[in-house]
Amino acid sequence: MRELRVISRAVVCLTVILLCGFGAMAQETAKPVKIKATAIQVDMIHSDEIKLPAEFQVSMYEDLVRQLQKKGPFAHVYREGDRNAASAPDLVILRSNVTGFKEGSQRKREVTTVAGETQIKIHCVFSDKGGKTLLEADVTGKVRFFGGNLRATYDFAKATTKIAQEHFSSTT
Amino acid sequence: MSLRGKSVIVVTCLVAVGALMLPAGSAAQQSSVPVTDAPVKVVVIKGLQGVKDNAKGTLIVGDGSMHITHDTTVSNLDTHSIEDVVTGDDSQRVIRGTLGTLSWFAPYGAGRFLSLFRSKLDTVTIKYRDADGGLHGAIFTMPVGQAEVIKKELLAQGARTTVTEADTKAGATTPDAKEKQ
């Protein structure tokens, strides 16, 4: 009886280990192949259809440049119009267009907690020098509870940098 | 004294502080007469090269440059490199900083109540080019009434804008022009 218990426990343990192993293998196989890019040029955020306040536009751009410089996979991060970008090999150009914007209220958030969310939806396109699209993604920046409205732009910048980390590499 | 009694005293004190701060904020708004030559107290929210985020300083426009003094250092920005100047408005909590943070722990939602007391601000957003042609953006906040003065000065010194005075007035009269808070 005791031996049977030991055997059953061992079987359970083995099953768990095998399942974990298969899970890890499945994750590894699902990883996308990273695109080689040593430099990125960040263009100013556009909002063709949505009326976006200038401070949000500038804040998104600055946060994006800063986050990519800090945590991005690129060796160089160039701003729009930077003459040095022309000579950069494997240059990726990031264009972002605002597709949705809901300006919340910091006062409402602080007073009610549940109301006053600020949300920005942006369509990001990573392309090469020739204009060929390498990656497209829809990113959302939010501020729900704490902080000013401009914190949504930081959230957007972090999310976009994460996407860049997942799909680009300067070494591969 | 019972715990309830102490709580009541804390709430009363916070409300009193809030009530005292509110007229002070209003007075500051009323006394913000546009002065062109005097340095304007600003907060650099973000984006200015060599200046930390949320740095407090003073701003003077003159000699074809925008001079921002902060922490005994002066940053100069050529006004001809400024491609766009846009003004706006915002608001901030009257009680902020350490006291503002502590107020969140006050009982009976006193912290939330104090969030209702806010002072208005003007914002100036600029876009400018660096020596390599790279585009930058910077956001400043300043007392109410100063943003338009700064904008006019910058435009007079060679800066450009995409939003004219007429556009601003038209925007203010549209039904969707709302208070941002």
Image: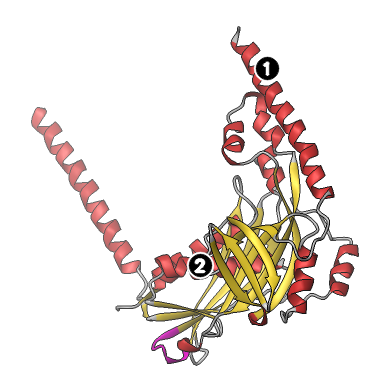
Which one is nearer the viewer's eye here, B115 or A91?
A: B115
Q: Where does the C terminus of chain A fall, quadrant-wise? A: bottom left
Q: Which residue is depicted at the point 61% across and 65% down? A: B68
Q: Give coordinates of residue B101: x percent, y percent.
A: 58, 37
The three-letter amino acid code for the residue at tag 2 is Gly
Callout 1: SS: helix
Inter-mark Cα distance, 2 to 1:
47 Å
The three-letter amino acid code for the residue at tag 1 is Val
Horizontally, is A157 left or right of B78 in the view? left
The magenta region covers: A86-91
Q: Where does the N terminus of chain A fall, quadrant-wise? A: top left
Which one is nearer the viewer's eye here, A8 or A83?
A: A83
Horizontally, is A166 left or right of B88 in the view? left
Kindly tell me whether residue A50 is visible in this rendering: no
Its colouring scheme is secondary structure
Subunit bearing disc 2: B
Kindly tell me whether residue B130 is visible in this rendering: yes
Q: Any magenta on residue A89?
A: yes
Label at residue B8 = 1
Label at residue B50 = 2
Callout in the foreground (2, 1): 2
Horizontally, is A45 left or right of B37 in the view? left
